[in-house]
Amino acid sequence: MEKPGPVGLPSAVRRLRCRTLHTHRTFSYSNMIPVIRRSLLLTLMLWCTAAVAQNFTDVKPSPQQVAWQDLEMGAIIHFGPNTFLDQEWGDGTADPAVFNPSQADPEQWMRAAQSAGIKYVVFVAKHHDGFCLWPTSKTKYSVKSSPWKGGQGDLVRDVARAARKYGLKFGVYLSPWDRHDPSYKDSAAYDGYYLALLNELVTSYGELVEFWLDGAGSEGHVYDFDRYVDNLRVYQPNAMIFADAALLKYGDIRWVGNEDGNASEDNWNVLDLRGYLRYRPAEADTPLRKEHWFWHPNDEASVKTVGELLDTYHRTVGRGAQLMIGLAPDRRGLLPDTDVKRLREFGEALGSTYAAAKNLAAGATNASVYRAALDSDADTVWSPSEGSHAATIDLGFAHPTTFDRAVTMEWLVDGQKVQKYAIQVMQGKRWKTICSGTTIGHKKIDLFARVSTQRVRLNILSASATPRIREFQLFLGTDAR
């Protein structure tokens, strides 16, 4: 929230521009002496400096960022000439004729994604090889030069329609690196080309939830990201811009830093880039098939197990980050049966453990005191008295209750506040800490040895401002039953 500007300033001082100063009145101080004028100017300069200063805890997310974090799991889909050439990174020389899927069915992709609990998809519209999967008017190196659908196909359109049909949000990936187009050698010329492609995507396929800017291969190349972002914002003001922090400092979300599906336990959503603070939650991308973003033949053994996917979920969503699973249709244009089955099994495993009906905390005898934190409704929030910097949710049970994990969610509309917490159980007449941590953020899943107790508490030991808890839930994992 902006602070109101000081009023009654001399006209010469009022003409100075400060980002947080908005003055709308006209005053006449023709008789003010120079000494007073200089004093007021100094006061204004000091006020401006203080007004633009930021603290981590003062930085708040936009409504779009909050909504994006609530999606929790997405899928990024890689499909193109690489699929047909058994390679990961094309060099831009592949003949468009190689792209000719016989049964391309984006609806099958969406059904499989939906079964895993995935809420949004990002489609790779152009990878580093420069091949465009929509019939762009800016290059012949696209689906319109392929035999697929007689050159009349538009895979971006098909994926967007399929996603929305199955209730999934849709986004696009447009690689800045281009190994095909000759203009890439000239930064200014390529900026114009890339911007033209971007404008086609952001104006032709409906609302985008996310726009991916991949930094791969871009070392030493200069992009006019300001122009890219300006144009994107005109047509897609609500789209989340994904980029590595080192590539684009004013993106909306950031790369977690690896492709292993591993977020840090201490995961703050506010990023400091040389004093520039911005709310940028992390997205952790990792492929369903180990180390492979594109499909490869005779590669079924690389599909991750359900156990591996659950572990990834706990290390991403369970640490306040977003999980982005890489899906890869095969040469038919279908997700292989193995992948479809594994996604369904993953979704079933999540549901069998974390379904609202299995939340043990809701059965506490004093649940009504903390109802907003125990009701599995993310739109309700529990908080202690305003101004508190610590809080406790203390639950009692009529009989010993057994659990091995806790799910805690922080209300982030006002920013991330919790700095230190512990989950404790009563053993005898003493509290015993079974796990502790620093950040909670969007969601924190704590796993620990199975424990039985009649009293358990979430003890928020330190918060920068009044802590607000959306959920505190207890579960017993299916492997422990």
Image: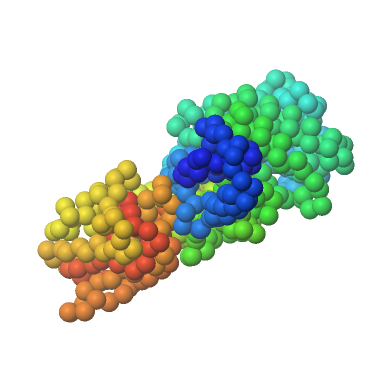
- Residue 29 against residue 446 in the figure, above or below: above
How was the colour assigned to the protein in this rendering? rainbow
Q: Is residue 96 left or right of residue 346?
A: right
The residue located at (77%, 50%) in the rendering is 217
Q: Quadrant of the C terminus?
A: bottom left
Asked whether residue 155 is in view, the answer is no
- Residue 119 against residue 269 in the figure, above or below: above
Task: Examine the image and state in which quarter residue 75 appears.
Answer: top right
Q: Nearer the viewer, residue 235 or 82?
A: 235
Q: Where's residue 15, x and y in %?
A: 63, 38
The residue located at (59%, 49%) in the rendering is 36
Q: Is residue 302 left or right of residue 412?
A: right
- Residue 330 against residue 311 in the figure, above or below: above
The residue located at (32%, 43%) in the rendering is 379
Q: Nearer the viewer, residue 200 or 43?
A: 43
Q: Is residue 368 left or right of residue 109?
A: left
Q: Where's residue 162, x and y in %?
A: 52, 29
- Residue 352 against residue 452 in the figure, above or below: above
How many marks the image carries: the answer is: 0
Q: Where's residue 135, x and y in %?
A: 71, 24
The residue located at (65%, 59%) in the rendering is 274
Asked whether residue 275 is in view, the answer is yes
Q: Nearer the viewer, residue 229 or 444?
A: 229
Task: Examine the image and state in which quarter residue 105 appears.
Answer: top right
